[in-house]
Image: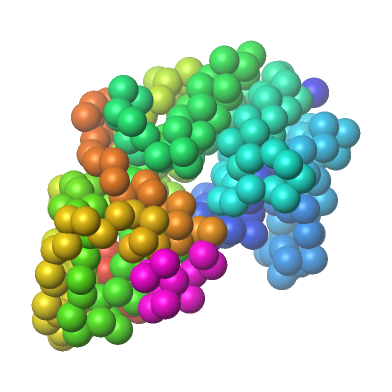
């Protein structure tokens, strides 16, 4: 049973966005219960007064215990590769979201961070799955807020790590046509600010919002501007016949990102990720960080 004075549950607290969110909630005096399948990864948070619970979104019994007494919950769980059990990542994500919606039926609010992309577009499998997760949570009984973001710029973000490695390591790049795809990157600080601003906001209930930074850029422009911040000027040559799958293998060679994650990110880059509806700016009017500033902050580890 949810309680109005209970803590806020953060799933995926050991992840990049989850860790930043926990810190932001604590800064605002909000009690946090952090959930992970491997609670030892979160043990340093105990010194900050965070309650740590072991649970798995695929196990409803453990999930029910983790949700007991919390007033709201953040859903920051994503599958980036097939489970190895015969089920696809989309199957796993769907089942996990159904579990969360069912067990969280009496929460005051669920907040989910998904992916940005037009629902009527031919989305990559991963972006389509992110959209489906949001729809599943919105269909549940608990008031739900879905925030859909594109590339997150910040130290530790897989998307930014890939971008940084390409800009830093390759003086000459032979790139596929997806480098011309437009996107609207958002700083990690702004992403977290939206997540916090959505909490307890009655105007954000049962709504899906698109969030992005102030700049709309192609991936090529992002590489060039990131390289400029680094004091480099790479030569970029477009090769239209280079497919996302082939370019993903190329990315494997120059970035430390696991292949399954890199391939998922590359597949998503074929879809434009631009904010079409500025409702988020109306409901949660926050200052936004320009791209170059976000890159500089990321390089400083901020």
Q: Residue 58: percent from the left, percent from the top?
A: 77, 38
Q: Which residues are magenta?
A: 249-259
Q: Residue at horizontal 42%, vertical 77%?
A: 253
Q: From this view, report whether residue 82 is shown above or below residue 210.
A: below
Q: Residue at x 82, y 37 (%)?
A: 59
Residue closest to the eye, 99 or 67: 99
Q: Is residue 172 left or right of residue 52?
A: left
**Residue at 62% across, 17% down:** 140
Residue 154 higher or lower than 92, as above or below: below
Query: In the visual, does 8 lie left or right of 176?
Result: right
Q: Residue at x 46, y 38 (%)?
A: 125
Residue 1 figure quarter: top right
Residue 253 belongs to magenta span: yes
The residue furthest front is: 241
Q: Looking at the figure, which quarter contains the C terminus?
A: bottom left
Q: Position of residue 230 (x, y in %)?
A: 21, 82
Q: Main secondary structure of the magenta part?
A: helix
The answer to whether residue 73 is seen in the rendering is: no
**Within the magenta stretch, is there residue 204?**
no
Q: Is residue 37 at all visible to an observer of this figure?
A: yes
Give the image quarter of residue 90: top right
């Amino acid at each position: 049973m949810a309680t109005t004075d209970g803590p806020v549950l953060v799933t995926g607290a050991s992840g990049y966005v989850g860790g930043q969110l926990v810190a932001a909630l604590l800064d605002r005096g909000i009690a946090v219960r952090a959930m992970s399948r491997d609670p030892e990864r979160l043990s340093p948070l105990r010194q900050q007064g965070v309650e740590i619970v072991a649970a798995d979104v695929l196990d409803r019994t453990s999930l029910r215990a983790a949700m007991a007494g919390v007033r709201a919950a953040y859903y920051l769980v994503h599958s980036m590769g097939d489970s190895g059990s015969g089920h696809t990542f989309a199957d796993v994500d769907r089942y996990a979201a159904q579990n969360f919606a069912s067990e969280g039926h009496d929460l005051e609010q669920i907040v989910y961070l998904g992916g940005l992309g037009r629902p009527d577009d031919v989305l990559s499998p991963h972006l389509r799955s992110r959209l489906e997760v949001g729809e599943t949570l919105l269909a549940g009984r608990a008031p739900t807020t879905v925030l859909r973001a594109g590339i997150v710029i910040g130290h530790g973000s897989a998307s930014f790590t890939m971008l940084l490695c390409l800009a830093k390591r390759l003086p000459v790049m032979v790139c596929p046509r997806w480098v011309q795809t437009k996107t609207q990157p958002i700083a990690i600080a702004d992403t977290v600010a939206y997540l916090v601003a959505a909490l307890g906001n009655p105007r954000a209930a049962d709504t899906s919002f698109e969030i992005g930074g102030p700049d709309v850029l192609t991936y090529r422009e992002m590489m060039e501007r990131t390289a400029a911040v680094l004091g480099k000027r790479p030569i970029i040559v477009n090769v239209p016949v280079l497919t996302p799958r082939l370019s993903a293998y190329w990315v494997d060679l120059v970035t430390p990102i696991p292949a399954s994650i890199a391939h998922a990110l590359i597949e998503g880059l074929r879809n434009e990720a631009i904010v079409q509806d500025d409702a988020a700016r109306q409901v949660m009017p926050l200052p936004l960080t320009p791209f170059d500033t976000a890159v500089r902050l990321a390089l400083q580890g901020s």
